[in-house]
Image (spheres, rainbow, N blue to C red):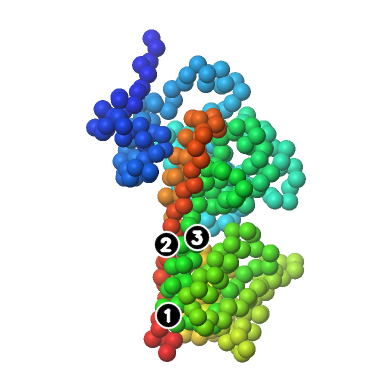
Amino acid sequence: MMAKKVKVKDIAAKVGLSSTLVSLVLNNKADQHGIKRETQERVMMIAHKMGFFQQKTPETREKESEESPGLVGMIVPSLTDPFVVDLIPYVHKALASIGIGFSVMTKDPFDRRFSRFVTGFRKLFSGMILVSEAADEATVRTLRAGDYPFIIMETELHNMRLNTVKSDMESGMRMMAEHIAGLGYTRISIIGREQPVESVRENIRLIREQLDALIPDVSIFDATVARIPGVNIIDTARLSEFMRPPYSTQLFVISEASLVYTVVDYFNRKGVRVPHDIAIVSLEDGAGFDLFSTSVTRIRKQVPELASKASRMIWTEIKNSGKGKFKRAVSIQPELIIGKSCGTHRQRV
């Protein structure tokens, strides 16, 4: 006996909501209409339990031999990136709640063989999430040419209309700059690596712009740190140079979470007190920042919300077989976490 097809009105009756509201949730339009996240999650859970997402049309049955439905891949630039480490379990949980499998792979930007794998994604995955630097123009153009369901996260390609989920880092940098300006710092050095990745380079550009706009007499210095040849650590010797004239840095803005650990360790070994001798802030969040003897002020991305939005967006793309006419760009404001590492105005005086 053929199982009864689950309809939107059946789900609506089960959760006690209108069919219109349920339809908006299932079609990834809930946020546009202000539907609460708790309601969205309840609808998706009930729909999954009732088998709504497992229903197959004749067309999908014909494609089963060519595709592997129910598995989403996520390509990331690195598995050691703190943001990626945070993101993976949330995406996995969000996709699992609607019955979709999940797999992660890394992309080496210098591996030319990767381009040959792109065309084979359809045989392995129903859709793909490309994160930050993994969403390079060549990969995106290849996926678009084949109407392959995909979205990009934490980056944007300005010459293409794509489904995008990203943090509003301009807003985040404005919050950080306003906090720094309120503390009265005017001599600021930005610590960054040589040849940073594009997302870090963009954050540095944004914080410089905001500091210049908010602090009339600000002096900003580039405290670039080099990697010591042959070892996987950075050379911190120049940091003490920026604490002396002519720089006389009052505050270090650290561009990457991974650099914070090295800088804090260097200050501890040199007996430099944070924030009494030098203040620090980070443009990225990192594990254990609240556990330091002096908690770190930083920008924290809203990872659970990013993962939830991305999961619903890629599911919509899969249902539309990558041919959806409308492209969405979702931007989520990050959070400013204020620790003790940048001190207070009273401490500066």
- SS of the residue at dot 1? helix
Q: Earlier in the sequence, mark 2 or mark 1?
A: 1
The N terminus - image quarter: top left
- Of 162 and 102, the residue lying toward us: 162
Q: Which residue is mark 1?
A: 183
Q: Which residue is mark 2?
A: 335
- SS of the residue at dot 3? helix
Q: Is residue 234 left or right of residue 33?
A: right
Q: Earlier in the sequence, mark 3 or mark 2?
A: 3
Could you say which quadrant of the image residue 121 lies in? Answer: top right
Marks 1 and 3, Cα distance to the nearest angstrom? 21 Å
Marks 2 and 1, Cα distance to the nearest angstrom? 18 Å
- State yes or no: discs 3 and 2 in contact (Cβ < 8 Å): no
Q: Is residue 340 left or right of residue 147?
A: left
Query: Which residue is rendered at x = 50% and y = 80% of the image?
Result: 216
Could you say which quadrant of the image residue 235 lies in? Answer: bottom right
